[in-house]
Amino acid sequence: MRTTWNFFSAGQLTFGTAAAGQLGKLMGRLGVGRVLVLSDQVLGELGLLARVCEPLVAAGMTVEVFDEGEAEPTLDVVAKAAERARQFQPDAVLGVGGGSNMDLAKMAATLHTHGGKPEDYFSFDNIPGPVLPIICVPTTAGTGSEVSSAAVFTDVANQIKVSTLSQYIRPNLAVVDPELTYSCPAKVTADSGIDALTHAIEAYTAIDYSALDVIPGDPVAYEGAHPLGDCLAERAIALVGQFLSRSVADPEDREARDGMALAATLAGMAFSNCGVALVHALEYPLGGALHCSHGAGNGLLLPYVMEYNLPERVNKLARVAELLGADCAGCTAEQSARQAIEMVRQLRLEIGVPDRIREIGGTSEQLARFANKSFEIKRLMTINPRTPSEADLLEILKTAL
């Protein structure tokens, strides 16, 4: 029986409105003189890129911008970013945007330091040592990539999303300024927000750290659920229940925007330690083939996986219902747990996240392949509280079709 657990996060987290204005001072303390900023053209057009770069220039830094980032970034874009880093020779990389741009910064830092190809570092613990300093500034409220050890990309040739996990790519500095999310479109707000909820619920309902079958002291991709992770996940779930629908319905609701920014970061801390599981395992091949956003794919699958996991997580799912604002007075634990699943379904419908795989172009003929690809992602299978067979995965997907 495992008796210890670990917790990791960004080297420093600076959170709050107008925090982006402190970037020059904060990065100066890291000794940064030349910084490669990885972002995209949309953020440049919105003026958000300028808001991030101006404090750096004012602090005397030499700034180079790579603005070819894209949603669900492909390995081709990763290669371009790494080449730009090779040409510019930065002291640090700064990812500005959603999880895609922040993940791009993580891999660019890895390739610039250690060389090779992105494929060399896929899966867990394949980065051999420290990388170029990474700074992350999110402009969406969802992925939690600013505090995580993961980077996710799209392998177009194999029609699957792939990930790299390593403590070496946790950002040295995360600056979360909710003001940068105020211009986020409703669909991106919805997809990002349901992604944060997925992170929090999967972390909260993961296998207990004491039950994880690992050798004590050996590094693991995820620790399993533990007390600190539970604290973070509970707060994140409550914030999403309070603020996600509001932030989608009224983009000018700054209280809701601020609340969701905090929820995303807390959920990022929770999942990047305790783990994500079956929802993510199923989403990787589904999203890779159907080209939906990672958040939308996760949100679609989340209640179906909650239903599958319910026999092993009745009490925790009952608590999820309470955190989302349900009145559970007089309910049994199982009734409350089922209420949690229904509340997630209703929240998803309220904000416009698809309910069925067929709504995003999936067909019954694809499901067996999705199940097979998901089943191969063993690091996520072991974190799930209920151990699935490949047949179980296929049944979940059939139910979600």
Image (tube, grey):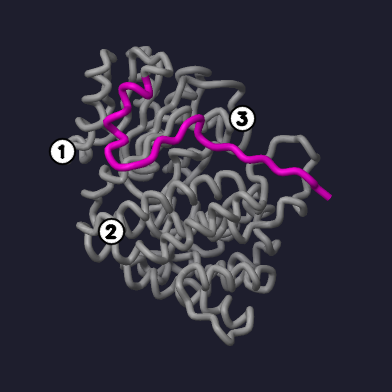
Disc with the residue nearer the chain's start (2 vs 3): 3
Disc with the residue nearer the chain's start (2 vs 1): 1
Determine which residue is flagged by label 1: 45
| Magenta segment boundaries in residue numbering | 1-27
| Amino acid at pointer 2 | Lys
Q: Residues within 10 Å of mark 1 (few under 14, many from 20)?
A: few
Query: Alpha-carbon distance for marks 2 and 3?
Result: 35 Å
| Amino acid at pointer 3 | Asn
Residue 376 seen in the current view: no
Q: What is the count of numbered marks?
A: 3
Q: Is residue 45 left or right of residue 86?
A: left
Determine which residue is flagged by label 2: 187
Determine which residue is flagged by label 3: 126
Asked if the magenta segment contains residue 356, the reply would be no
Whole-percent x, y for residue 225 in the image: 65, 53
Name which residue lies at 79% across and 46% down.
3
